[in-house]
Image (cartoon, rainbow, N blue to C red):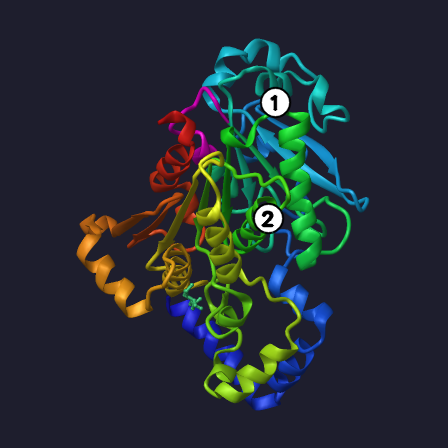
Amino acid sequence: MASMSALQSILYGLFASTGLYALFIGLLTIPVLQDQVIYLNRVTLTWFQDVNIPEQWGFLRNQVTPFFLTTPDGESLHTWHILPPELYRENQEALSAEPHGLALNVKERLSFKLLRDDPSSLLVLYFHGAAGTLGSGWRPPSYRAMSANAPHRIHTLVVDYRGFGSSSGYPSERGLLTDAITLAEWAMKEAEIPPSRIVIFAQSIGTAISLSLIHHMATQPEPTLFSGVVLVAPFADVESLTATYRIAGTVPLLEPVAKFSRLLAWLNTLIATKWPSKFKLADFIRRCEDMGQEHPKYDITIIHAEDDYDIPWSHSEQLFWHAANASIPHGITFEELEKEKTASRVDNHAGGWAVERRTRRGVIREEIVKYGLHDRIMSYPIVSLAVMRAFQTLT
Ligand SMILES: *[C@@H]1O[C@H](CO)[C@@H](O)[C@H](O)[C@H]1NC(C)=O
């Protein structure tokens, strides 16, 4: 902690004494530079490591199959297919005898056939956060958490979005949605997994991408609803994030500006990237509530740690409120909902607390843990449990 505040004071000192901060804010009004700050996609964190050798992050030989997906607008997305450990054990000999590394034709690989040909296989589509690649930080341990509660059948697919890692192109709000749709369509059409056996998992900026995805899928003439959605450390929208976001949980980017609400509002009008998650989630829920019995029910879980210094858990409170409000025809105020939550919540003591709202057409949960920070939490059992629960086909 001491080093964090030391870093802060050095930065503040530097900004204040030289006017660099004003320059920095000025630069932030340039869209291309905004995107660099929001996505941090060039901060790969796996420098000098070949992301086609997943064993470097503790996976077994050929437990992960790296391959490329192509988007309709011509980008190639670096993708990992991660086998659950028990299924791996059952097929270990055949798997380790296969060719190694990047699969030029993934459909020839045993891993792909194990996913496609087993009618009981389940699939997590994983949408990672800003910065880094498929192999960065707490992501590899969190892939293992996806299948922890059904190690014989939960597969995981994760992509580096355009502009990230070995994928081509540059990130944008529209482009990242296209990437998410590409992954989902591939899973349903090529791997032949129906949406009832698919769970969407996302963290940080991935939650904005996945909310955009589920909204898009649910608003098509033929709506598609996935079995469930698990959102970890989400944010309400970019506008509310600018005031609170800290780079690497340390550098409060706009805190000096946030003290002047007019200045912050002005800066926000210049930020082209919106990611309006709270409205996407609310609209998704309104539409689902209006759907008939022939459609599946929705299942949304929001998870946040109280000690998340990058994105404060108040963002999850906002998202949960927008979701709950949208599920009630006449709506509910934030304060009313907070009262209801206090009365109905399950107190897990040092483990935090949880609330669940069952509506006509679905369920919304908020689970707040005391410890987990911004990234580490993704590898925790609370996530494994939430993913398992989100596979409604199991119940
Ligand atoms: C809450 O729901 C009501 C009724 O649908 C709506 O009029 C209102 O705009 C919603 N509030 C928010 C903050 O979205």
Q: Position of residue 101 (x, y in %)?
A: 69, 27
Instruction: Tell me which image quadrant ligand 1 sits in.
Output: bottom left
Judged from this view, the residue extending furthest toward the right is 74
Q: Is residue 279 above or below residue 354?
A: below
**Which residues are the magenta region?**
144-154
Q: Position of residue 45 (x, y in %)?
A: 61, 51
| Image mark for residue 62 | 1
Query: Which is closer to the viewer, label 2 or label 1?
Result: 2
Quarter placement of the C terminus: top left
Check disc 2 and report the residue beneath it: 219
Q: Is residue 113 above or below residue 2?
A: above
For marks 2 and 1, the one nearer the N-term is: 1
Quarter placement of the N terminus: bottom left
User: Image point 44% across, 63% down: which residue?
Assistant: 311
Nearer the observer, 300 or 112: 300
Judged from this view, the residue extending furthest toward the front is 292
Q: Position of residue 123 (x, y in %)?
A: 53, 30
Which amino acid type is marked by label 1? Asn
Q: Is residue 313 above or below residue 378?
A: below
